[in-house]
Amino acid sequence: MPPTHVHFNGSVNLADTETVMREIASRVPSGLRRIPDGETGDRGNWIFFQMQKFLQSPSLTAAHPHDNPAEEYEMPQVRLADGVEPADMTWPDPGYADAYLESYASFAALRRQGVIPDGVRFQVQYPTPLASISAYVVAGQQESLLGSYERTMFADLDRFLAAVPHDEVAVQWDVAVEFGLLEASFTGSGAQAFDVIIANLARCAGQVPSDVPVGLHLCYGDYGHQHFKQPESLALQVRVLNAVIAAARRPVSFVSFTVPQYQHEEAYFAPLAELAADPGTELNFALVPYHPADQAPGTTDEQVRLIDAALAASPGGSRAWGICTECGMGRAGREEIPGLLDLHREIVAVG
């Protein structure tokens, strides 16, 4: 069964929300189910948007290498200010609801003009609370601050959803830092880390009302268009999705899987036969390369065949599925974006 639709993981390196939506709608006229705002402006570098917010809080202060001696100090981090206890922590406004409400206004206007087709939802992306805490809070304070930060992020999402029609929006949780932690943890206490991460992801999914589609972007990072580790197969991604489906209070509506562009081995896709997602869960696979000229001829056709074969062996059987890039397109060159959008259309059309 060839790919039937496209999925966008969120970021698109264009000037502003209206430009992003106009370009997507014009270049991908069919197979479009959801449209993001491109995470333009301050949100362009993913969770660094939250680090900027953290530094605005009087409860936090910039950390220094000696504050976190157990880990290599590679990025700016924060710690509780002197005299502040975790129970007293007051988080700044995360800023997502304000940004998405502004973008929703552009979405609604473009839909009224007929630029965005009826039935296409406005998709918002949130990093999991664990992502920002793990990246930017010193190791010794992450666990004590995660709960209050999670409540702050959930309140931000609630505020956005309270202000927009539920039949016009969808929510995606970006799951990237978790795979870094899981891949590293298998050298140590992997089972404990897995259980904690699944519980966190189940709470994220469950925070979205049942009448709003919720998705998971299963990601291995995109620094310089390179993953922090090339996944050996889809086994861990399938295991995570299955566990979240079992633990969450509601169904997972859509998911995007990481597929390295060079990957066309049967063993990579074989774990899809263990997929527990029912046919109502939309599946998307990263068959859209950032640099089309680097992809060997016929690779996409072979990947389509392998995906179909693995899904046919799964409990849910053969089903329709879609395509996406491995990560967002926020770090692609701006001049590359039109071609990348066209490639989404071409892959679906060829299929």
Image (cartoon, helix red, strand yellow):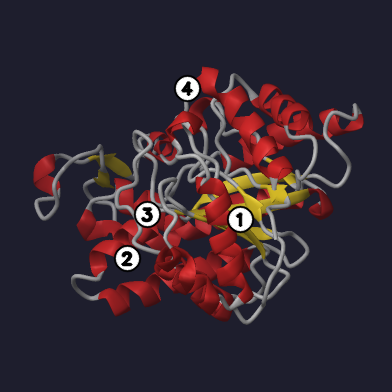
Near mark 4 (Cα within 10 A), the count class, few <14, some 14-19 or many ≥20, is few
Residue 235: give x, y in percent of width and height. 42, 70
Residue located at (8% from left, 45% from top): 66
| Secondary structure of residue under mark 4 | loop
Determine whether, in the image, residue 41 is placed left or right of residue 184: right
Residue tagged 3: 177
| Secondary structure of residue under mark 3 | helix
Q: What residue type is labelled 2?
A: Leu
Near mark 3 (Cα within 10 A), the count class, few <14, some 14-19 or many ≥20, is many
Residue tagged 2: 182
Quadrant hosting residue 311? bottom right
| Secondary structure of residue under mark 2 | helix
Residue tagged 1: 284
Q: Residue 70 carries which label?
A: none
Residue tagged 4: 333
Residues at badges 1 and 3 in contact (C-beta under 8 Å)? no
Residue located at (35% from left, 35% from top): 55
Which of the two labelled residues, at mark 1 and mark 3, occupies the earlier sequence position? 3
**From where the camera sits, is residue 173 visible?**
no
Query: Could you give the CA–CA distance between mark 3 and mark 4, rounded to whole angstroms?
Result: 24 Å
Query: Could you give the CA–CA distance between mark 2 and mark 1, rounded to whole angstroms?
Result: 22 Å
Q: Which amino acid does label 3 sit on?
A: Val
Residue located at (31% from left, 43% from top): 60
Query: Could you give the CA–CA distance between mark 1 and mark 3, rounded to whole angstroms?
Result: 20 Å
Quadrant hosting residue 246? bottom right
Query: Could you give the CA–CA distance between mark 3 and mark 2, rounded to whole angstroms?
Result: 9 Å
